Image: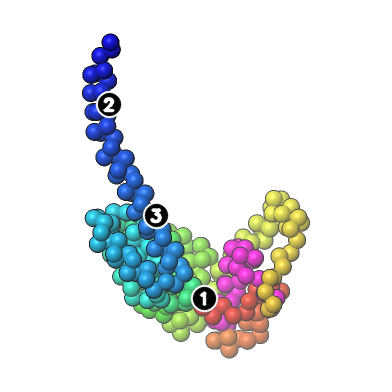
Amino acid sequence: MKNWSIPLIIAAVVGIVLVPILIDRTQGIQIRWALASIANAADRGDAQAAAQLKDLWQRVPNLEKEPDYWSVLLKIAISQGDGAEVIKVVQQALRYNPENYRHAELAYFYFEEKQEFDKALEAKLLFYDLQALRHPLALNDIAYMRSLAKIDLENGLLEIDQALKFSPDESAFRDTRAWLLFQLGRYEEALQDADFAVETSERQYKKSQEQIPNRILAWLSGRPKPSGADGKLTQQEAGMQLWSLGVLHFHRAKILESLGRDKEAQQDWDWLTENQLPLDYAWR
């Protein structure tokens, strides 16, 4: 007769270790399913989503530790269209864990799409910590958002000037300064930066189009065709490079018009028309 005592003891010990792990994993899966269900309810505009999340929060200890908790909370705030609550959720998420910075980025895109640039600026500032603020790209992002929000424009100039110390010939940075100066009514100074930005970007764009891979791609795909009834390309249809160049032409046209130089401005409007780009970049 075999002695089963040792295998039974081993099995019991293994069971003692594994059972809590399996229970914990099962509970974790159930929590994630519950959060996903609440997120779907928020997407449908279900007014009960917030109450469901609150009920789950009361029943589950330390629900804030779940990576999806803050995403669902943010989604609910967005579904309710409450901009102040969206910012509040992002602030709470970052206080709980600085690695939740992606929620600030999501909030930024939400506000930018709605053209609520003051809130977009708040979200952008939350996205960057103090160290990141010293990075030229971060400085440019924030300064440009100030130009759209028309808030703290002088601070925006300080930020973009700091960025330009690192990259004085960066056309995007010069365009940001041009648009800040335009908002401040300093049109002559703005035009100098706008001219530089357009001319530099035009050279870069033409050079890139002459590269063999891009020439082959253009030959295969042909000229992009607008999908809308207005005959204008969307940002996705135009591609980032052409669209960004269009923004620069729009900025310069507006600056030239403010200086009363309408004939020169018309050249930029004509460029936008020839390239099937919208003439109304007002939100830019």
The CA distance from mark 2 to mark 1 is 67 Å
Q: Is residue 25 left or right of residue 247?
A: left
- Residue at the disc numbered 1: 284
Q: Mark 3 falls on what kind of element? A: helix
C-alpha distance separating marks 3 and 1 = 40 Å
Residue 115 in percent (x, y) is at: 47, 77
Q: Looking at the image, which residue is at 45% across and 81% down?
A: 183
Give the amino acid at mark 2: Ala
Q: Which mark is residue 33?
A: 3
Q: How many marks?
A: 3
**Amino acid type at mark 1:** Arg
CA gap, disc 2 and disc 3: 32 Å
Splitting the image into 4 quarters, where does residue 14 fall?
top left
In this view of the protein, which residue sits in the foreground, 256 or 135?
Answer: 135
Q: Secondary structure at mark 1?
A: loop
Residue 103 magenta-highlighted: no
Q: Magenta segment range?
A: 231-256
Picture residue at 66% right of the left edge, 57% below the top: 207
Mark 2 or 1: the one toward you? 2
Q: Are marks 2 and 3 in contact (CB under 8 Å)?
A: no
Residue 126 higher or lower than 217, as above or below: below
Q: Earlier in the sequence, mark 2 or mark 3?
A: 2
Residue furthest to the front? 1
Task: Indicate the position of residue 206 as horizontal and vertical percent values.
Answer: 67, 61
- As for residue 243 lying within the magenta part, the answer is yes
Q: Give me the residue at 33% from left, 73% from top.
A: 85
